[in-house]
Image (spheres, grey):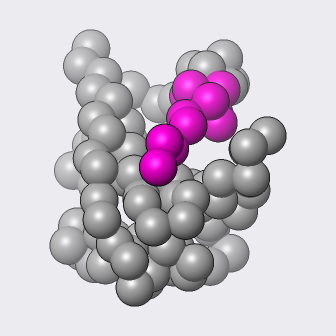
Amino acid sequence: MIHLLTPYSLDYRCCVKNLILPLENYLKIHEIDYDAENVAVFENNEGTSIRACEFQKEDRVWMVYMVANQMRMILVTYNSDEEVGDELFQQLTNIISSVRILN
């Protein structure tokens, strides 16, 4: 059983207001087609924009989160060799929703 939660800090000035492009680009790198119907869109209590999607590749489950506020963006990926159950999904959502981007 291998689980990885990895954050990446990005300075993505052109796309922070529209998280679709960097999410599309990330998925394209992994040869996954972007499908807007499979992307969750929400904000945390601080007004930080969050986009999330899930896909499977090479027997691994991937969850990708784009978190942005003003001029900064954080890409967070989770991948595992096991399916994500409801409890783990809620824990990941809580972790991602608690992210604060300081200016």
State the residue in front, 47 or 79: 47
Residue 84 in the image: state x and y as whole percent: 52, 29
Residue 85 in sight here: no
**Quarter of image, res 37:** bottom right
User: Image check: 87 left or right of 22?
Assistant: right
Residue 52 in the image: state x and y as whole percent: 56, 55
**Quarter of image, res 24:** bottom left
Q: Considering the image in quadrants, where does the N terminus appear?
A: top left
Question: Residue farthest to the right?
Answer: 45
> Residue shown at 30%/65% (left/top)?
11
Q: Number of numbered discs present?
A: 0
Residue 4 in the image: state x and y as whole percent: 28, 27
Is residue 86 positioned above or below 93 on the image? above
Question: Residue farthest to the front?
Answer: 103
User: Image check: 35 left or right of 75?
Assistant: right
Is residue 45 positioned above or below 36 on the image? above
Residue 26 in sight here: yes
Residue 57 in the image: state x and y as whole percent: 28, 54
> Residue shown at 62%/30% (left/top)?
98
Magenta span of residues: 92-103
Residue 22: say if magenta. Answer: no
User: Image check: 73 left or right of 42?
Assistant: left
> Residue shown at 50%/44% (left/top)?
101
Is residue 54 positioned above or below 1 on the image? below
Residue 97: say if magenta. Answer: yes
